Image (cartoon, rainbow, N blue to C red):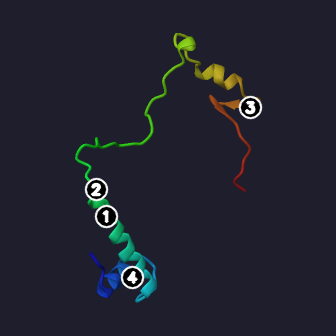
Amino acid sequence: MSITQEQIKKITKNLAKLPESSEKIENDLNSILWYIEMLNEVDTSNVIPTVSVTKKWTPLRIDIEKQELTNQTELLKCSSNKIIAGQIAVWNIMK
């Protein structure tokens, strides 16, 4: 698949702030399309689709698994800053 100058003009006009009629843009877009076509040729029929590449949970350590979780009050006691309405007060950075 290759992209035409007319398609490039449409893209630069409607979707991006790119200069019109640039040979570099045409080459870059054609390279991207070529790479996408190459990826489409890969057989992924036996691959299970994933929503995320990271785990959505973290297993607890066996030696501390049965301990109770810390509550908000205990966590707030760890701060040396003033506590206001159940929240840690921080310096005003907006001036």
Q: According to the image, label 4 marks what residue?
A: 26
Q: Residues within 10 Å of mark 3 (few under 14, many from 20)?
A: few
**Which comes before the other along the chain, label 3 or label 4?**
4
Quadrant into which the C terminus falls? bottom right
C-beta proximity under 8 Å, tags 2 and 1 = yes
- Name which residue type carries label 1: Met
Q: Nearer the viewer, mark 4 or mark 1?
A: 1
Mark 2 → mark 4, Cα distance in angstroms: 25 Å
Which element is circle 3 on?
Answer: loop
> Who's the residue at 48% across and 23% down the image?
59
Which mark identifies residue 38? 1
**Which comes before the other along the chain, label 3 or label 2?**
2
Q: According to the image, label 3 marks what residue?
A: 82
Q: According to the image, label 2 marks what residue?
A: 42
User: Could you tell me residue 88's position as x and y percent?
Assistant: 67, 33
- Name which residue type carries label 3: Lys
- Position of residue 56 relative to residue 75, above or below, is below
Q: Is residue 68 visible?
A: no
